[in-house]
């Protein structure tokens, strides 16, 4: 089974994001619940440009209340940029919940 | 489920970027810079908005609702749209099954379906996002989530119950400090001026310290006074 480059980047970003302290989970989506396991979650989206380089990464997370939300989001942005080998400016992080 | 990719149209193993002109809005991660709320629209591979397709199904399936948003030729013929509708049906079936079994009939089904659709709508249209952190950082949070923290901080002030809390970004897609309009009710006997001031201080510092949200203005409106004797668990009729 082959993994497309887009899937690989998406998976690397997802792993990096979940490892950030203060991240509870990715945004849980109804679609995610309905879709088959293993399908990439909609909470991490990676866009590539025509040359195949990462152009934009959008991440939606649920943060833990014990951490300052902006600090968590900032750390996620940094971690995701590293994982995607993209500049931090390409990464957008939205906090969709606090638990 | 095989056709249910949120990615651009194409055979499964094909690289998405070989079709740069198809459904530009449907590209994964696409983010229209001036409209921070719009990236939440979940687009199907055919370019249709998932929320619109589901709403169309919901209205089309409801007796008496013939005027609005009937299923059109595209939805009926498009594999992606049909798959999305099937998802919704699965969700309904899953949600309805226990109730029907327990209650011995479908009288509650429409209310439950309405609740399910409320959840669906909330997920698909979660409201606006607020800028977090510094002006040059692309980090955001849902208004509804920030409002919950602000309301909780207000209720830490003795005698205060928080009501509506609206938090507005600077506008025009600009990142910057937000403005907060908070409504509270205060228990009889509390000094309104001192209480409002305590609410304001608590809310601003909670936004700053717990969230990292900079507040430029915070209006506290006392909308009512409430009875100190009222306790939720005191079951006096």
Image: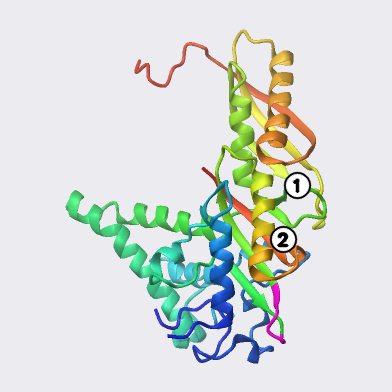
For the question of whether residue B126 can be seen, the reply is: yes
Q: Is residue A53 magenta-colored?
A: yes
Q: Position of residue B142 (x, y in %)?
A: 63, 50
Q: Are marks 1 and 2 on the same chain?
A: yes
Q: Position of residue B57 (x, y in %)?
A: 44, 71
Q: Which quadrant holds the C terminus of chain B?
A: top left
Q: The residue marked by circle 1 belongs to what chain?
A: B
Residue A37 lies in quadrant: bottom left
- Mark 1 is surrounded, within 10 Å at the Cα level, by few (under 14), some (14 to 19) or many (20 or more) other residues, namely many
Give me the chain letter of mark 2. Answer: B
User: Which residue in the protein does label 2 denote?
Assistant: B36
Q: Residue at x 50, y 82 (%)?
A: A3
How packed is label 2: few (under 14 Cα within 10 Å), some, or many (20 or more)? some
Q: Quadrant of residue A53?
A: bottom right
Q: Would residue B147 be found to the left or right of residue A29 on screen? A: right
Q: Is residue B138 above or below residue B215?
A: below
Q: Which segment is the magenta one?
A: A50-55
Q: Residue at x 72, y 70 (%)?
A: A86
Q: Which mark is residue B133?
A: 1
Camera-near label (1 vs 2) is 1
Residue B38 in sight from this viewpoint: no
Q: Earlier in the sequence, mark 1 or mark 2?
A: 2
């Amino acid at each position: 089974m082959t993994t497309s480059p887009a899937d690989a980047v998406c998976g690397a970003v997802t792993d990096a994001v979940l490892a950030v302290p203060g991240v509870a989970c990715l945004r849980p989506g109804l679609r995610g619940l309905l879709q088959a396991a293993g399908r990439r979650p909609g909470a991490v989206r990676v866009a590539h440009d025509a040359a195949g380089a990462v152009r934009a990464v959008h991440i939606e997370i649920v943060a833990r209340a014990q951490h300052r939300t902006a600090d968590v989001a900032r750390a996620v942005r940094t971690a995701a940029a590293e994982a995607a080998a993209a500049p931090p400016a390409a990464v957008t992080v939205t906090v969709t919940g606090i638990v | 489920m095989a056709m249910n990719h949120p990615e651009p149209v194409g055979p499964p193993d094909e690289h998405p970027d070989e079709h740069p002109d198809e459904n530009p809005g449907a590209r994964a991660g696409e983010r229209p810079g001036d409209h921070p709320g719009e990236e939440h629209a979940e687009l199907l591979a055919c370019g249709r908005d998932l929320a619109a397709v589901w709403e169309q199904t919901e209205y089309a399936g409801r007796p008496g609702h013939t005027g609005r948003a009937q299923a059109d030729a595209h939805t009926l013929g498009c594999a992606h749209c049909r798959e999305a509708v099937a998802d919704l049906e699965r969700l309904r079936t899953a949600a309805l099954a226990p109730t029907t079994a327990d209650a011995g009939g479908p009288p509650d089904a429409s209310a439950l379906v309405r609740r399910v659709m409320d959840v669906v709508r909330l997920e698909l249209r979660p409201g606006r996002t607020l800028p977090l952190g510094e002006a040059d950082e692309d980090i955001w949070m849902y208004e509804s989530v920030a409002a919950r923290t602000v309301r909780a901080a207000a209720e830490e002030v003795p005698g205060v119950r928080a009501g509506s809390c609206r938090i507005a970004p600077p506008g025009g897609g600009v990142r910057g400090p937000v403005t907060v309009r908070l409504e509270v009710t205060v228990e009889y006997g509390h000094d309104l001026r001192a209480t409002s001031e305590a609410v304001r201080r608590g809310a601003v510092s909670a936004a700053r310290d717990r969230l990292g949200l900079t507040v430029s203005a915070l209006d506290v409106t006392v909308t009512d006074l409430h009875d100190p004797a009222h306790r939720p668990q005191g079951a006096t009729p």
